[in-house]
Amino acid sequence: MFTEAQGTSLGALAEAAEARFGDTSTLLFEGATMTSAQVGALARRFATGLTSLGVAPGDRVAVCMANCVEVLACYHATW
């Protein structure tokens, strides 16, 4: 079923999901919802912040967050 995804990075898969589902609500947590486009936009902002701090491809990033809607965007940004 997922054979076309072999060798594809998690970041690329997240971007493909955003392109495919765009304005569809994809996250519901404690009454808050986010669309794929909103998660993608938040992830890009977070990734820009990481880059400005000197984080580069291949670096390791530890994520220590409470379970919240932003944690998914954080994962997408680090991928």
Image (cartoon, rainbow, N blue to C red):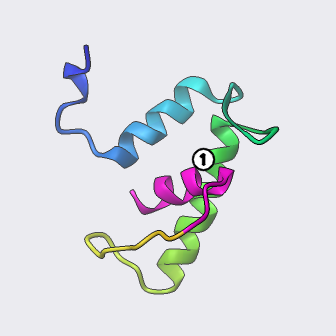
Q: How many marks?
A: 1
Q: Please, is residue 72 above or below residue 1 in the view?
A: below
Q: Which image quarter: residue 31?
A: top right
Q: Which image quarter: residue 35?
A: top right
Q: Residue at x 52, y 66 (%)?
A: 47
**Residue 14 location (% of width, % of height):** 45, 40
Q: Is residue 36 left or right of residue 51?
A: right
Quarter placement of the N terminus? top left
Q: Residue at x 37, y 42 (%)?
A: 12
In the rendered image, residue 77 lying in the magenta stretch gets the answer yes
Q: Is residue 20 left or right of residue 28?
A: left
Quarter placement of the C terminus? bottom left
SS at mark 1 in the image: helix
Crowdedness of circle 1 by 10 Å Cα count: few (<14), some, many (20+)? many
The residue wearing badge 1 is: 40
**Residue 5 location (% of width, % of height):** 25, 29
Residue lying at the far bottom of the rendered structure? 53
Magenta range is: 65-79
Type of residue at label 1?
Gly
